[in-house]
Image: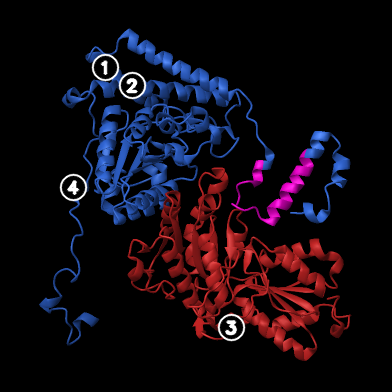
């Protein structure tokens, strides 16, 4: 006899039927679900309504971005950059992220998103400081409202949520757009950030660039979700699935999400379906985990070529326009090459200046030690200087 | 650096928890950018009631109940600090803070440095820590060594009711992140401290000599201070006159006060609950040895928790440094000089 079969069992009482008393669907999930196919504009009838000015702006930025990626990659071969994670093939996502934002908004890029920062107006050399290895971050984040390029995966997403939330508390209509890769969506911080954003209805847009691989691990081993955009429904925010190589579609979807957030409509998760044409970084061998044939199918879906098709149909792809765009991109590359080829001047004493607002006695002592070593180096009297460091007490860490 | 006893008039017994609440309240009233956030800090007032009444007084936007997610709590606080707020984050228990370690170490601790001063992190991370309250597993860790191992973090822990107020005010006012460790078994310790009387905001990075003595120095902090004070009183019967130094702040570390004391007494014992191996005592002993070697009459000894995962509550009294173990350790210092003569004071 089981417990339920015992005399007095309440199993047959009708009052126990139905769902638990407090259960109710919190929101209707249907409007939050992404489309079945990635949203496209180029090559569809809807492309006709696109503004020509927007198309030429996007095109100019895409071409500049492609050239920037090539130049930065070349700089790694010359040893001028320690590493460069190229966004070749993903330029439409990068450019659209930058152009969807207003000046007052904030961008939270990952390490692959230098291009978004440059398209937003950041000095190309400053954008590469981290990857060059002279300092971790080469710009004042407040100046362009761009958070430092983030190396840990997805940890910048909660920062974007907190900043957007704080802005709203202060009554500022500021939106934060945070970028992350498909691999980053597996991290705990991705989950916590989306959850906080939805609960707080924070004005944030999450842009996932699904480029197919987290270094070498393909999406199928990253997630079992129908799509990354589908994850949104679990948090109670809309998910949008977009062709990440369709620059006007990316721009439209991100702009809508930004405006929705600004109006108090809360966060959106946008998944851009794209592809990383280059390896993860120059240190990676992509032939080990993917076929050339696969890469070629994506080369055929190139964001620049897709846009050129539309521009040509409108007779906008004139020799003069293409030439001017290319010249502008070459100028950008030449400037980058020239300035990156100069050795940065670094002051070792800066190591101690920004650990704390007020230097601790421990750091003062360590700074004194380094100063003495530098002086000795400069004087070429290493042995004598070692004895002249001052009292051991002062120089000791 | 001794804290002077304030006049007994207008004072009544208050607990450390009440002093912390008052510090939060005063900080929020003085500065609208101060925001308290964490799980259960709102309607419940925190599981230790330290945030009691703040949501009611300042609204839920200033004292916010968050989702149960420590990385999310600290990560969003980073973004809030980037936008000019001064978040005070509560991690409910010591071991609950571990999910937030990546945010703490990869971002909070180094944001000023990596942006060369452009982005600062005026964050206070309140963490009830340590044992002695009969908590089950994951509720009694002394995690200070992890924080101390991370450059860019200030690590502060009060041991008195007055310091709970003064140090928390200073932590919130600091433009750099502070891991503010609250010794949870002292939450209900009382002192004649009145929230209505003016209390000094204690500067961070300064130790306090809690008891003058000449035979040896006990160096301690947080939950072990009352134990050391008791040991020092008990030691009088043995003819030992122990000095007790309360560090108050582990980073910045007050080498001056510690060394001045050890040079006077010639002997030192570091006392803390955290395990000894890799614990703060090793660093402190090394610093003393490097600076005071010629003044030392004996090696610097440590009384620490055992090198074990925090034990179950029924056994924790064997693990925690107690008066007897402290006195036994003091006795192990090589007593050759005549105590009554003191040491060159």
Mark nearest the camera among 1 and 4 is 1
Q: Secondary structure at mark 2?
A: helix
Q: Which residue is mark 1?
A: A311
Location of the N terminus of chain B by quadrant is bottom right
Q: Earlier in the sequence, mark 2 or mark 4?
A: 4
Are tags 1 and 3 found on a single chain? no
Give the numbered dot on residue A59. Answer: 2
Mark nearest the camera among 1 and 3 is 3
Q: Earlier in the sequence, mark 2 or mark 1?
A: 2
Towards the viewer: B303 or B247: B247
Give the numbered dot on residue A31. Answer: 4
Q: Residue at x 50, y 82 (%)?
A: B14
Give the quarter of the image for residue B239.
bottom right
Q: Which residue is mark 3?
A: B7
Q: Is residue A161 left or right of residue B229?
A: left
Report the Cα–Cα distance between label 1 and label 3: 83 Å
Are tags 2 and 3 found on a single chain? no
Overall secondary structure of the magenta section: helix
Q: Are marks 2 and 1 in contact (CB under 8 Å)?
A: yes
Q: Is residue B77 left or right of residue A56?
A: right
Palette colour of chain B: red
**Taking A242 as reference, is A74 above or below it?**
above
Give the residues in magenta.
A350-374
Q: From the rendered image, report the letter of the chain displayed in blue.
A: A
The answer for which chain carries disc 3 is B
**Taking A41 as reference, is A235 above or below it?**
below
């Amino acid at each position: 006899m089981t417990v339920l079969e015992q005399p007095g069992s309440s199993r047959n009482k009708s009052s126990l039927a139905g769902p638990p008393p407090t259960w109710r669907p919190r929101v209707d999930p249907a409007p939050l679900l992404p489309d079945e196919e990635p949203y496209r504009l180029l090559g569809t009838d809807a492309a006709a309504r696109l503004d020509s000015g927007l198309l030429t702006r996007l095109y100019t930025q895409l071409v500049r971005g492609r050239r920037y990626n090539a130049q930065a990659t070349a700089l790694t071969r010359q040893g001028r950059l320690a590493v460069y994670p190229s966004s070749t093939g993903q330029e439409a996502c990068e450019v659209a992220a930058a152009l969807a934002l207003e000046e007052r908004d904030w961008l939270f890029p990952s390490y692959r998103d230098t291009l978004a920062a440059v398209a937003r107006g950041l000095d190309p050399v400053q954008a590469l400081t981290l990857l060059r290895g002279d300092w971790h971050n080469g710009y004042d984040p407040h100046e362009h409202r761009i958070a430092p390029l983030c190396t840990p995966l997805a940890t910048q997403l909660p920062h974007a949520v907190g900043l957007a939330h704080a802005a709203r508390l202060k009554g500022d209509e500021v939106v934060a757009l945070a970028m992350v890769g498909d691999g980053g969506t597996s991290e705990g911080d991705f989950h916590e950030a989306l959850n906080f954003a939805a609960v707080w209805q924070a004005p944030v847009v999450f842009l996932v660039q699904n480029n197919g691989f987290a270094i070498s691990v393909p999406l199928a081993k990253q997630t079992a979700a129908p799509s990354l955009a589908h994850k949104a429904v679990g948090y109670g925010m809309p998910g949008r699935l977009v062709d990440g190589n369709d620059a006007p579609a990316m721009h439209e979807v991100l702009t809508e999400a930004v405006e929705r957030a600004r109006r108090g409509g809360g966060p959106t998760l946008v998944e851009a379906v794209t592809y990383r044409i280059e390896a993860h970084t120059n240190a990676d061998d992509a032939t080990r985990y993917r076929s050339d044939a696969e890469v070629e199918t994506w080369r055929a879906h190139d964001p620049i070529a897709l846009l050129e098709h539309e521009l040509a149909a409108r007779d906008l792809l004139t020799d003069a326009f293409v030439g001017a765009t290319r010249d502008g991109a070459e100028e950008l590359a030449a400037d980058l090459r020239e300035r990156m080829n100069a050795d940065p001047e670094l002051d070792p004493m800066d190591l101690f200046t920004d650990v704390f607002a007020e230097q601790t006695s421990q750091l003062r002592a360590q700074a004194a030690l380094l100063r003495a070593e530098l002086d000795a180096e400069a004087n070429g009297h290493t042995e004598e200087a070692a004895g002249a460091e001052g009292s051991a007490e002062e120089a000791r860490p | 650096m001794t804290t002077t006893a304030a006049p007994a008039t207008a004072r009544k017994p208050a607990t450390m928890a009440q002093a912390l609440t008052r510090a939060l309240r005063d900080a929020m009233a003085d500065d609208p950018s101060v925001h308290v956030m964490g799980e259960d800090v709102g309607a419940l007032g925190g599981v230790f009631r330290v945030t009691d009444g703040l949501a009611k007084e300042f609204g839920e936007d200033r004292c916010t109940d968050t989702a149960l997610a420590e990385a999310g709590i600290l990560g969003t606080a980073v973004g809030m600090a980037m936008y000019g707020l001064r978040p005070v984050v509560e991690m409910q228990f010591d071991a609950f803070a571990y999910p937030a370690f990546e945010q703490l170490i990869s971002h909070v601790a180094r944001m000023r440095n990596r942006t060369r001063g452009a982005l600062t992190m005026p964050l206070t991370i309140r963490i009830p820590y340590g044992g002695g309250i009969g908590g089950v597993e994951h509720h009694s860790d002394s995690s200070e060594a992890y924080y101390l191992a991370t450059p860019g973090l200030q690590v502060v822990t009060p041991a008195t009711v007055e310091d709970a107020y003064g140090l928390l005010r200073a932590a919130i006012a600091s433009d750099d992140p502070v891991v503010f460790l609250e010794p949870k078994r002292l939450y209900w310790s009382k002192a004649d401290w009145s929230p209505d009387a003016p209390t000094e905001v204690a500067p961070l990075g300064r130790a306090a000599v809690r008891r003058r003595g000449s035979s040896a120095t006990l160096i301690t902090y947080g939950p072990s201070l009352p134990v050391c004070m008791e040991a020092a009183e008990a030691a009088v019967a043995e003819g030992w006159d122990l000095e007790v130094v309360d560090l108050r702040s582990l980073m910045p570390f007050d080498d001056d006060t510690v060394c001045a004391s050890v040079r006077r007494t010639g002997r030192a014992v570091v006392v803390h609950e955290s395990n000894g191996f890799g614990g703060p005592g090793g660093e402190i002993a090394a610093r003393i040895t490097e600076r005071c070697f010629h003044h030392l009459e004996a090696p610097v000894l440590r009384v620490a928790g055992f090198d074990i995962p925090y034990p179950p509550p029924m056994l924790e009294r064997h693990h925690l440094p107690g008066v007897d173990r402290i006195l036994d350790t003091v006795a192990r210092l090589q007593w050759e000089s005549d105590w009554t003569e003191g040491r060159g004071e």
